[in-house]
Amino acid sequence: MTGRHPLDLPELRPLWSAVHDRLSTGRPVSRVRSGPLDDAGREALADLLGLDRLPGAEPTIPLAGLDRAVLEVCGRTVRDVVAAIVGPVHDRAADRERKTGQRDALWGWLAGHDVVTAQPVLLEWVGHLRANGLVDGSPDRTRGLLTAALTVLHALPADGEPLPVLAARLLDGDSHALDDGTRLSSLVLRALAVLYGTDMPDAAEGRRALWSRAGVADDELSATVLAVGLRPGGEGPVAAISRICAASGHPVSLTLAQLRSPGECTGPAGPVHITENPSVLALALRRFGRHCPPLVCTSGWPNTAVIHLLRRLADDGASLRYHGDFDGEGIRIAAHVMAKAGAVPWRMAADDYRAAVPRVPSGPDPGRLTPAPWDRALVDSMAELRTAVVEEVVADLLLDDLAEYRHAP
């Protein structure tokens, strides 16, 4: 700073620092306590205020009186003087309010993001992140990392890509963006752990397993999908195998490798029903045999092969209809299938659940419940009745629905 202020005296520095600190709170200030002042400081303050005796070592000074004295000396207000001597006077109350508003807006944006609203269990992830605060205290840096994490979550399950390839494709060519130990990798893995209902892995092997479950570098041969009644057009191997199995009343098990290179294959244009449990598939085959309509099984949480097939069917014009268990895990699986494959619910509304509960009056507890995006009343009903209803309990209703679409060669 050039041109030293006439009141910038070493002996008055404690006074100006105290005034600056109080004014920077952003709250009304009537008195300021200064000190400790040495003898020279007490004399300088007495001279400034025109006192007939020396003040104490830590005097409390009326701000109005100090303001008048400063005006007489230099024609400037106390605020101007301390700004010139100490630095700009801030408004910490306004700064706190502004930062609180920025944080609230950030977490509100995250909670309302399409990736989260499509699978509401991820609100638990949002809550964890909010409790742990901003990255380096920066809303902008935090939003940037979250945007990248949401981009990855939206793309999962992956189609068996290695992690560096997935990262480079999604994150501006940065093949190391999801390397083990990075903040972004930890954000995505924590979301996956919440989604799948597992603990956050604390070892590299567990983290690799979680990535694999989300389709990253998946095994093309061990990832399979079970289906019945698929009769795709075309002369490729997948179409031929599927038609042979359907015509003989057998299920078909397709590997991810086959689905990636299906040859000529066009899916059905009509509805394809989806169930969570293989037992429903078996019941459908027992009832319909070679006339069974198209039915795909996720076998619990869908792997990459399941999602790949469902997306292919949807792209070929099929409408996908999903049914699963009425328990906490079943609701999360249903939300996942609907979000990732574009399926719609099939007998998965609150009314369907309430109608089914009397069939299992002593059924098991549904466990941890999270919202069902397609019917907000469903989980409220489950929380009220506290009874899980697995698919097998309502299998007769599902098969009656399927009868409308049985294949008639």
Image (tube, rainbow, N blue to C red):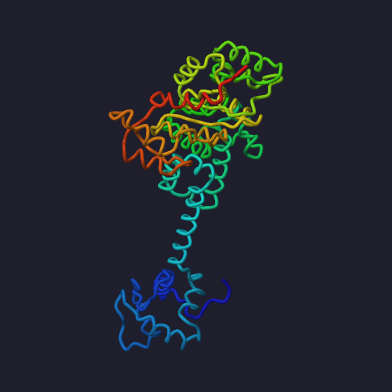
Q: In this view, does 58 lie to the left or right of 271?
A: left
Count of numbered badges drawn on the protein: 0
Residue 328: x and y, percent? 39, 34
Q: Is residue 381 above or below residue 24?
A: above
Whether residue 151 is situated above or below residue 391 in the rendered picture? below
Which residue occupies the foreground of this view, 287 or 177? Answer: 287
Q: Which residue lies furthest to the top in this view?
A: 248
Q: Residue furthest left?
A: 362
Image quadrant where one finds the N terminus: bottom right
Q: Position of residue 39 (x, y in %)?
A: 34, 77
**Image quadrant of residue 15?**
bottom left
Above or below, comparing residue 233 to residue 75 in the picture: above
User: Could you tell me which residue is drawn at 54 percent across and 26 percent down?
Assistant: 404
Residue displayed at 47% across by 42% down: 373
Quick one: quadrant of the C terminus? top right
Which of these two is toward me, 343 or 209?
Answer: 343
Front-most of 61 and 236? 236
Image coordinates of residue 316 in percent, x first then y, are 66, 29
| Between 175 and 193, the one nearer to me in the picture | 193
